[in-house]
Amino acid sequence: MIRTRIEKERREREWLASYAQKSGDSAGRVHVEPKHPHRTVYERDRSRIIHSRAFRRLEYKTQVFLNGTGDHLRTRLTHTIEVASISRTIARALGLNEDLAEAIALAHDLGHAPFGHSGETVLNELMRGHGGFEHNVQNLRIVEVIERKYPRFAGLNLSWEVREGLQKHQKFYDPPERGLHEKYMSPSLEAQIANLADEITYYSHDLDDGLDFQLITARQLEELEVWCDSYAEVRRHFPKLRGKELHSYVIRCIIDRQVQDVVTTSEEFIHAAGVRSANDVRRQKKPLIRYSLPLLKANQALRKFLYKNLYFHPRVATANDRACELLKNVFERYLKKPSLLGETTAKRVRKDGLHRTVCDYLSGMTDRYLIEEHGRLFDEEKESSPVRRRLDLGRKRRNE
C-alpha cells in the first residue's frame, strides 16, 4: 500500500499528541508551492536541508578540535547527525512530530563559521558596526537568502515551523539585523526538543572527544556527578570493562540518562501546563521541554568543567588562535580587494554591502578551504607555512 501525504497527515492526527505540530496544520512557506503527493511538508524540509550545499560543508567544519586533527573526532556534520537522532528519540517518546524535530536539528548548525565558536567570535568582532555575526541568525540567513537551489526564489523556502525553530538561543549584537528574525518568537515543542538535544549531544560528546584526545582524564572527571553516577552504573553491570571501552560506555550511559530525564520531566511540565494544542504551547512563557532540577545542576557543573579544562585548554586555544589569525587576514584582504570574491559573490555587494557579503562568504567556508585560501592569497606554501604547522597540533596522535 502506498503511503500518500494525505494518509500520513491523517495518521499524525490520530497518533500524535494533541499539542504536537501536525504537518497538515503547517503555516506553510513564504513562496507557495504545490503539495507533494507522498511527502509531508516537514519531510520535504528535511530533504531540502540534507541536499543543501551548507549541510555538506559541515563535514569539514570544526566542532571543538580543528578539522583534520584526528580521524575519530567529531565535526559539525557528525554532531548534527547525533542531534537529529536524539531529537527523533525524544519526539517519538513524547508523541510529537519526529520529522519536524529532525529537520530543525539538521539545520541548527548550518550558520556556523569555520573554526567553531572561535571563528564566530572573530567574525562578530570584524562585523561590529555592520550587523554583527551570530550563527543562529546566520542559520536563518542561509535558508532564507543565501542557498540557491530553486529558480523561482532565494533560499530553501522551508516551512514556517522549521524557520521558527532555527531562531533558538538568539542574541543580537547590532539592532539592524533584528528585522529578519523577530517574526519567529515562541517555538514548538519540536523546536524545544532540537534545542535541548543539541545541548545533550554537545557536552556529552565533547567529553568523549576530550578523553579520546587525552586533554582530560577520567580521574579529573571524578568531581562530576554526571560522570560518577553513570560510571558506577556501568561498572556494576560490566566490571571487566577498561580503558576506552569503559569510557565510551559511560558516555553512552550519560546520554541515555539525560534523554530519559528529559522525556519524563517534559511530560510532567506539559501536563502541569495544561496545554492541549500547538497554539497553547506558543502561549507559554517558559520552555516545556526541560531537564529535572537535579540534572540541570549536574549539567551546569559539567559545562563549567568543560570550559575550564577543555574549551580553553592550551593546545585547543593555541590552535584556535592561529586559525583565527587566518580568518582575520582573509577577511581584511577581501575588504581591500573585493574582486577576489569572484563574480557571483561580488554581485551581492550592491545589495548586501561589502562587509555582509564578505562575512557570508567567509562564514560559509570550511576549515580546510579557508586555510587553503589563506595560502593562495598570501603566497604561503601549504605544508611549510608556520601557521599551518601550528594548526596541525595533535595530528601525530590521529592513529592512536
Image (tube, rainbow, N blue to C red):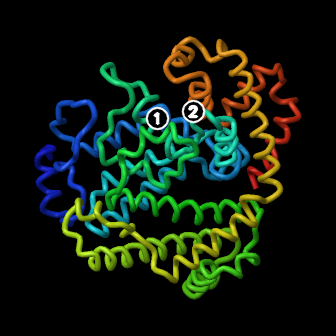
Q: Quadrant of residue 235?
A: bottom right
Residue 114, compared with residue 242, is above or below; it is: above
Name the side, left or right, on which 370 lies relative to 76.
Answer: right
- Residue 142: give its label: 1
Measure the C-alpha gap from mark 1 to mark 2.
9 Å
Q: Tag 2, which secondary structure? A: loop
Which one is nearer the viewer's eye here, 49 or 212? 49
Which one is nearer the viewer's eye here, 371 or 291? 291
Name the side, left or right, on which 400 lies relative to 52.
Answer: right
Q: Is residue 202 visible?
A: yes
Q: Residue at x 72, y 18 (%)?
A: 336
Q: Tag 1, which secondary structure? A: helix
Badge 1 vs badge 2, beta-carbon distance below 8 Å: yes
Which one is nearer the viewer's eye here, 357 or 248? 357
- In the image, residue 114 lies at what x, y percent? 64, 39
Q: Residue at x 12, y 62 (%)?
A: 14
Name the side, left or right, on which 385 lies relative to 151.
Answer: right
Q: Amino acid at mark 2?
A: Gly
Q: Residues within 10 Å of mark 2 (few under 14, many from 20)?
A: many
- In the image, residue 210 lies at what x, y percent? 70, 62
Q: Residue at x 47, y 48 (%)?
A: 108
Image quarter where the C terminus lies is: bottom right
Q: Residues within 10 Å of mark 1 (few under 14, many from 20)?
A: many
- In the image, residue 203 lies at what x, y percent? 59, 64
Residue 74, compared with residue 122, is above or below; it is: below
The residue carrying mark 2 is: 364
